[in-house]
Image (cartoon, grey):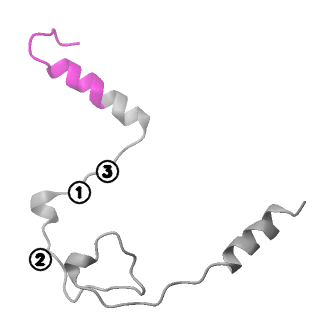
Amino acid sequence: MISVAAALARIRDSFAPLPAELVGLNEGLGRVLAEDLASRRTQPPFAVSAMDGYAGRAGGHRRRAETAQARRLCPGRRAA
């Protein structure tokens, strides 16, 4: 019996990457890029964080506090 590392090495050694080929954008679905791709411009081309904002996820303590606050503001329920 061989080790897992030796087995993986045998498997990796039996494969070779395919050569890169140039295809149109429509034919690229499901393919992997052969090299890194960098955008020529920023999209959107201006800062929009003041309008759109950023979302983040806080730890559990904030989530509980927000849930408690939401309960207080629900119509039809008495404020806590």
For residue 74, the mark is none
In this orientation, which residue lies closer to the viewer: 28 or 50? 28
- Judged left or right of residue 77, residue 39 is right
Q: Is residue 46 above or below residue 40?
A: above
Question: Does the magenta run of residues contain 78?
Answer: yes
Disc 3 residue type (three-letter): Gly
Neighbour class for label 3 at 10 Å: few (<14), some, many (≥20)?
few
For the residues labelled 1 and 2, the Cα–Cα distance comes to: 15 Å
Residue at 42% x, 40% y: name it. 59
- Judged left or right of residue 9, residue 67 is left
Residue 63: image location, x then y, percent: 35, 33
For the residues labelled 3 and 1, the Cα–Cα distance comes to: 7 Å
Sequence-wise, which precedes: disc 3 or disc 2? 2
Residue, disc 3: 56
Residue 54: image location, x then y, percent: 23, 57
Question: Does the magenta run of residues contain 33?
Answer: no
Q: Quick one: SS at disc 2?
A: loop
Look at the image and give the residue range highlighted in magenta. 66-80
Residue at 12% x, 67% y: name it. 48
In this orientation, which residue lies closer to the viewer: 36 or 78? 36
Are the residues tagged 3 and 1 within 8 Å (C-beta)?
Answer: yes
Residue, disc 1: 54
Q: Is residue 73 above or below residue 25?
A: above
Q: Quick one: SS at disc 1?
A: loop
Sequence-wise, which precedes: disc 1 or disc 2? 2
Residue at 42% x, 34% y: name it. 60
- Judged left or right of residue 20, residue 49 is left
For residue 46, the mark is 2
In this orientation, which residue lies closer to the viewer: 34 or 77? 34
Disc 2 residue type (three-letter): Phe
